[in-house]
Image: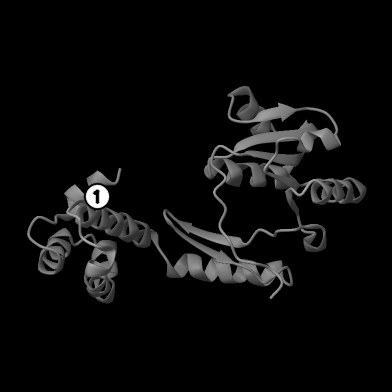
Amino acid sequence: MRYYPVKLDIKNRNCLVVGGGSVGTRKVMTLLSCGANVIVVSPVVTEQLFELADGGSITLKKRSYRTSDLDEMFLVIGATDNENLNRQISIDANRLNKLCNIADRPKACNFILPSIVNRGDLVIAISTSGKSPAFAKKLRKHFEKEFGKEYSQLLRLMGAIRKKLLSKKHEPEAHKHLFEQLIDSDIIKMIGDNKKDDINSLLRKIFGKEYDFESLMKSET
C-alpha cells in the first residue's frame, strides 16, 4: 500500500485551489464544507466561485498562479487543464513541504482524495489508490444506496448518549457493552421507520428511563 490513510482537520486552515473551472469549484465546495479558509487563484472562474468570493466565503485572486501563492498555505489543490502549470504547482509544493493534490494526476500528488459517501458524521472514504477512479465511483454509488440518512441520525443519537454518560463520570470502557447492545439491535430500522416509541423503549431498556430519543437528538443540534 502506497498511501497512508488519514483524515485531516482543515478547519480554519489556509487551503489554496489553483483553477476556477468546474473541477476547481467542486474542490472548493468540499474544502468549505470542512471549514477551511479557501483561496482560489485563477484568471477565469465559474459564476459560483465569483458569488462565493463576492459573499466573502472565499478569497479570490483573478490572475495566474505564482509560487508565492503557497506561502502560509496548509495544502494546495491544482485543478487546471494546463499540464505544465499542474507540474509546476506539484514541484513548488513538494519543495516547500506542502500537502499537494493535482486533480486526476495521482503521480503528481503527495496525497489523493478518496471518493466519499457523507451521511452527517458518518464519512465513508473509498480509494483505489489512484488505479481506477471509475471503480471508486461505482462503489460510492453502491454505498450511497446502502447507507441512508438514518445512519447520520444514529451517530447523532450515539454522540448524545455518550455525552450524557460521560457527564456522570462513567469511564468510556464501562459503557462499551451498552453501545454494542444498541448497535446489535434493530435501531437502524427503527430510526428509518420513525418508530419513536420503539426507539424510546429500547433506549430505556439499555441505558435507563431518563434516555429519551427526542431530547437526546435536540441536545446534539
Corner quadrant of residue 22: top right
For this orientation, the residue located farthest to the left is 209
Where is residue 43 shown, x and y percent of the image? 82, 31
Q: Is residue 15 above or below residue 179?
A: above
Q: Which residue is mark 1?
A: 217
Considering every residue shown, the one lying at the far right of the view is 84
**Residue 58 coordinates in the image, percent (x, y):** 63, 31
**Image side of residue 175 versus residue 210, left or right:** right
Residue beneath the point at 89% across and 47% down: 88
Q: Residue at x 76, y 49 (%)?
A: 97
Total numbered labels: 1
Q: Quadrant of the C terminus?
A: top left
Q: Amino acid at mark 1?
A: Met
Left or right of 117 on screen, residue 20:
right
Q: Nearer the viewer, residue 83 or 94?
A: 94
- Identify the element where label 1 is drawn: helix
Q: Position of residue 89 (x, y in %)?
A: 84, 46
- In the figure, is residue 196 to the left or right of 96? left
**Residue 72 shows in this picture:** yes
Q: Residues within 10 Å of mark 1 (few under 14, many from 20)?
A: some
Q: Is residue 203 above or below residue 79?
A: below
